[in-house]
Image: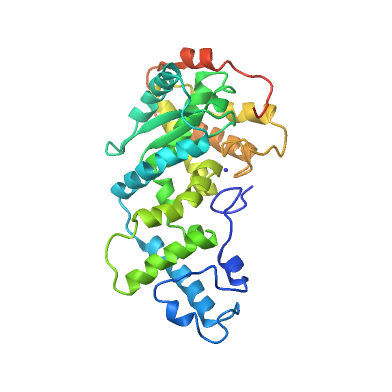
Amino acid sequence: MGETSDIGRRGLLGGVAALAATPALAQIPNIPGLSALQNLPGANAASSPVMSRFVDLAGQAASVIASMKLTEADEIAMGDHYYEPFIDQSGGRYNSRRAQEALHSFAEPVIATSKRSGLKWDIVLIDNETVNAWALPGGKIGVHKGLIRYCKTPEELAAVISHEHGHAELSHGIAQIKNKKFVQGMGGIAKQQIVEKVARTKAGGVGAFFTGEVLTAFEGPVYEMVTSGYSQDLEYAADGHIVGVFHNLGYDTGHATDFYDTMLKLVPPNTKATTSLYATHPGTKDRIKRLQKAIAADKTPMAAPGAHPGWVELKQSFPTRTVFRLT
């Protein structure tokens, strides 16, 4: 969450510039609509008509996606498609029914504040000691057990879950994907698959754009997006969402920034493999100031103090750590 790109602090491999610098076109096999150009004189040159055409189609792919009117059904389809693979890539489900049920109970009040009843909300406890949490389009949320270890109060965990809830509630995944820089920053192979889809569409192909092959091409970039942080504006918006959730549930907004404060105290500067919640994307200190300002400006009446079901059980499984370590 300093901003190195609009698609996460680690960034995504490749891009149009890197692709254009490649001396050969062997990496671009059998793109429909381009195969007839591959045997042209100079086809192996970076400035060849083939490469120019490929770069042009890559731009068209980005434009097509940016102009698409994606719906809630698209968000749900993306969440369903990526949820299990992302759980596996993140470390797998934590093997404790008691702990999983405790997290579900804890998150249920936050999820219940959603104004989008059509989303297929779910939350899973990930067997990973890194301090992270993520949200997919369509209402799917993952929380690493390592993050819970550093939450000393229920408000800290509630703030994290509310932040991730905000990403899904506010359609941040779709907004990020529709940003042209998302496709432009994809690796060569993934971009080629998108270009193929655009080329077939321009050649008279039919069917939905977000088919299985496109979702597969997006898998790596989307995983980077949800685990490494969204764009700065979207991260700020998700932080602001915390305030509304806390007011609705009667949680003390004075503790909404506590988790950020905890991470600033515990995590050594420039530590990698922590979380998009603790990152210079945007700077944590700046986020604390912005969130405190939003809390002070918000005049929404607060509900009666809410409970934190499942908190005791979670802390029994994951006692609070006061010294930071990655494992």
Who is closer to the viewer here, 118 or 207?
A: 207
User: Which residue is drawn at the image coordinates 27% and 62% (left, top)?
Assistant: 207
The residue located at (39%, 61%) in the rendering is 65
Q: Nearer the viewer, residue 95 or 3?
A: 95
The structure's colour scheme is rainbow
Q: Using residue 176 as the reference point, say whether residue 153 is left or right of it.
A: right
In the shown orientation, is residue 103 left or right of residue 186? left
The answer to whether residue 301 shows anywhere in this view is no
Q: Quadrant of residue 111?
A: top left
- Residue 163 position in % (x across, y down): 47, 35
Residue 208 percent location from the top left of the image? 29, 59
> Closest to the observer: 207 or 167?
207
Point 53% across, 47% down: residue: 224
Furthest toward the bottom, the residue is 41
Identify the residue shown where x is 51% and y is 61%.
189
Q: Can I make out residue 92 in this image?
A: yes
In front here: 71 or 260?
71
Looking at the image, which residue sits at the far right? 269
As drawn, 250 above or below 296 = above
Q: Provide residue 5's location: percent of width, then percent of height.
A: 58, 54
Placement of 227 over or under 256, stated as above or below: below
Quadrant where the N terminus lies? top right
Quadrant hosting residue 45: bottom right
Residue 71 lies, in percent from the top left, at: 30, 51
